[in-house]
Image: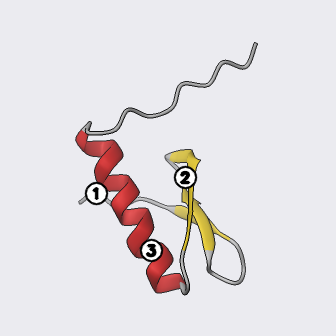
Amino acid sequence: MAKTNYAYWQDGKLGYLDEYPDYWTQGESEAELRENLLDIYRDLSSGSVNPMLIDNN
């Protein structure tokens, strides 16, 4: 897997991938948060889920 960055709140339980900021997730701990973010990354980068298209009009 390619290296990717993520943002998370100080408590380490809520965050998102920098590459996919529309997909937030949470975990009971920072370790669980990372696992959930990895699942999101796999789904989006594999093409099994299409990234959201946002219309800012």
Residue at numbered disc 3: 34
Numbered tag placed on residue 49 in the rendering: none
Give the mark, 2 or 3, whose residue is nearer the N terminus: 2
How is the rendered protein coloured? secondary structure
SS class, disc 2? loop
List the single residue furthest toward the right.
Answer: 57
Q: Secondary structure at mark 1?
A: loop
39 lies left or right of 46: right
Quarter of the picture containing the N terminus is bottom left
* Other-residue count near label 2 (Cα within 10 Å), few / some / many at <14 / 14–19 / ≥20: few
The numbered disc on residue 18 is: 2
The image position of residue 44, as x and y in percent, is 35, 44
Q: CA distance from mark 2 to mark 1?
A: 13 Å
Q: 1 left or right of 31?
A: left
**Callouts 2 and 3 close, C-beta under 8 Å:** no
Residue at horizontal 34%, vertical 61%? 39
**42 over 49 or under it: above or below:** below
Among the two numbered marks 1 and 3 on one chain, the one whose residue lies closer to the N terminus: 1
Rendered-image quadrant of the C terminus: top right
Residue pictured at 42% horizontal, 68% vertical: 36
Question: Residue at point 54% right, 87% down?
Answer: 29
Residue 22 percent location from the top left of the image: 59, 44
List the residue tagged with mark 1.
Answer: 2
Answer with mark 2 or mark 1, whichever residue precedes in sequence.
1
Mark 1: few/some/many CA within 10 Å (<14, 14-19, 20+): few
Query: Which quarter of the figure has residue 28?
Result: bottom right
Residue 4 locus on image (x, y percent)? 41, 59
CA–CA distance in space, label 1 to label 3: 14 Å
Amino acid on which the number 1 mark rests in the picture: Ala
